[in-house]
Amino acid sequence: MIQYKTKEEIEIMRQSCLMVGKAHKEAVKIMRPGITSMQINNLVEEFILDNGGVPSFKNYHGYPYATCISMNSAVVHGFPTNEIIKEGDIVSLDIGFYKNGFHGDSAYTYAIGEVGEEVKRLLRVTKESLYIGIEKARQGNRIGDIANAIQEYTEKQHGYGVVRELVGHGLGRKMHEDPQVPNYGKRGTGAKLKEGMVLAIEPMINMGVKDVVHLDDGWTILTRDGKYSAHFEHDVCITKGDPDILSSFVEIEAAEKANTNLTWSYS
Ligand code: MF3
Ligand code: CO
């Protein structure tokens, strides 16, 4: 059942969503070749707790960490580890922040040091596809309009693989609410979008084939061909007018641009 939020609830929720961006910003400040994803996880977890939040992911169906950190061919749900992050790696960081009864959930993929042009293109196109999807997040449209826009841009126009096994979702008092928000599908199909719906829209896009495999840790999803995969996620409220993006990349992007150990992929 879809949970529609009141204007008051949206404002509470916005605080959680914005805190996810601030947690990302803290992580970006320490990102460089030589650190580990566990260091990033621990910093983010501390930031969440210091700000009166609870990490949404920790203990969610037994997930053991505050963040998901999925590198290179890991699509999503990667565990933080003590392995050293190297130049040329891409790091998808997914963070959930729960406070005052509502979740925020947002992911961003970072390029460590110098990465090749084809990797930059994957990150740019995946992020662009998120905004192309968000553009369709309007009252009167349907879920399939968002899904189709993302698929057309990434798969048809750029030849990338759109992961089928994982989808975006409704977001609110629970981290996963109805409806599901796939990154593929037909225009004009699926649930009708209505004021007060909040959707976590999250394209997971592979440089190569769309197929994935499940690692035997029970969580990590990898590309079947071992090629890189990117992931960007925003929380978007449907209104009578323009889509209201509750999460924000503004501070993340400023920190990313300022960090000379990262490649700014989006220009
Ligand atoms: N952003 C992810 C999602 O929407 C976070 C879930 S990770 C989990 O599904 F470990 F908590 F499941
Ligand atoms: Co999500």
Image (cartoon, rainbow, N blue to C red):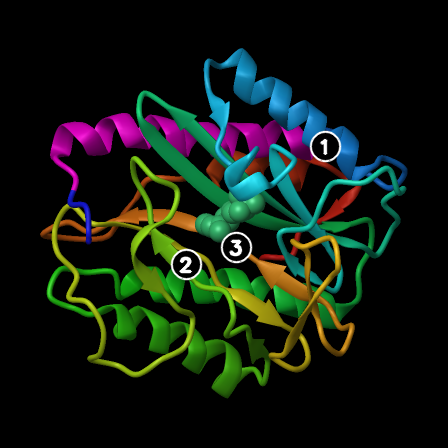
Numbered disc 2: secondary structure: strand
Apparent side of residue 242 relative to residue 185 in the rendered image (left or right): left
Local packing at callout 1 (Cα closer than 10 Å; few below 14, some 14-19, many 20+) is many
Residue bearing mark 1? 40
Q: What is the magenta segment's predominant secondary structure?
A: helix
Image quadrant where residue 261 sits: top right
Task: Give x and y (percent) for residue 253.
Answer: 56, 41
Task: Give x and y (percent) for residue 94.
Answer: 57, 44
Label 2, ligand 2: CB separation under 8 Å = yes
Magenta residues (range)? 5-29
In the displayed structure, 37 sits above or below 115; it is above
Residue occupying the point 89% across, 42% down: 84
Disc ID at residue 22: none
Q: Which amino acid does label 3 sit on?
A: Phe
Mark 3 or 1, nearer chain start: 1
Local packing at callout 3 (Cα closer than 10 Å; few below 14, some 14-19, many 20+) is many
Foreground disc of the pair 2, 3: 2
Local packing at callout 2 (Cα closer than 10 Å; few below 14, some 14-19, many 20+) is many
Residue bearing mark 3? 232
Distance between the alpha carbons at the discs numbered 1 and 2: 24 Å
In the displayed structure, 83 sits above or below 9; it is below
Residue bearing mark 2? 168
Task: Give x and y (percent) for residue 126.
Answer: 54, 65
Apparent side of residue 2 relative to residue 156 in the rendered image (left or right): left
